[in-house]
Amino acid sequence: MDIRAQNGIASYSFSTKSDDANVIFDTHILTRDSAGNTVVDKISDPITFNVRSERISVQAKTKNTGATDFTSNSVISADNLNGILLNLQKIGKGNTMLLSNFPYTLSVYDDISNTLLRGPINVSNNEYLFNDQTLLNKSGVYRFVFKDNAGINGFTTMTVLPALPVKIEVTPASNIFIV
């Protein structure tokens, strides 16, 4: 199939019509000069996309200091020592609940720089309490990615807000000189 490109950009879309599919793409660039001679003739390595209706639903819950239960939330304060409770459910076509095939692996990324911060961590049931205080004490946006052994994944993002200041020290100063 040929797809024309303009200014070096080609776009293409496809539909699997609600079916699972393994799709392999590669690119062939062929450029000719005004005399018809080939100037560039390159073929890319193939890229595979696995389209699946299954996914892992991830719900993040936090417990504020003094509270008794975890509640759904995507924001936590850096001084919260209760951690993040992550509930996992495997979902199929038509939002049907599926049996989970454990273990899952958890990887935690900085959501801005896409840097791997923790993982892979083995998760053996539908609830996982992430309580790594060295990470949760630092403000930032973190992405929690769960993947099963069939390659199905799901993720959620959490924002860790800076803790409230404990002490503010004020030092009087002046930049006025009297001559």
Image (spheres, rainbow, N blue to C red):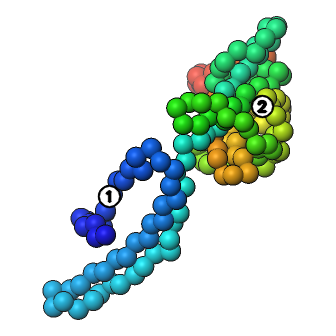
Question: Which residue is at 78% across, 49% downward?
Answer: 120
Single out the mark in the foreground, 1 or 2: 2
Q: Observer-nearest residue: 174 or 94?
A: 94
Residue 73 is situated, as x and y percent measured from the top left of the image, at 65, 20
Q: Amino acid at mark 2?
A: Asn
Q: Is residue 143 visible?
A: no
Residue 128 is situated, as x and y percent measured from the top left of the image, at 80, 31
Residue under label 2: 126
Q: Is residue 64 above or below residue 33?
A: above
Residue under label 1: 11
Inter-mark Cα distance, 1 to 2: 39 Å
Q: Answer with left or right where residue 104 lies relative to residue 29.
A: right
Question: Which residue is at 62% across, 34% downward?
Answer: 91
Q: Earlier in the sequence, mark 1 or mark 2?
A: 1
- Dot label at residue 108: none
- Determine contact: label 1, label 2, CB under 8 Å: no
SS for tag 2?
loop
Neighbor class of circle 2 (other Cα within 10 Å; few <14, some 14-19, many 20+) is: some
Residue 122 is situated, as x and y percent measured from the top left of the image, at 83, 44
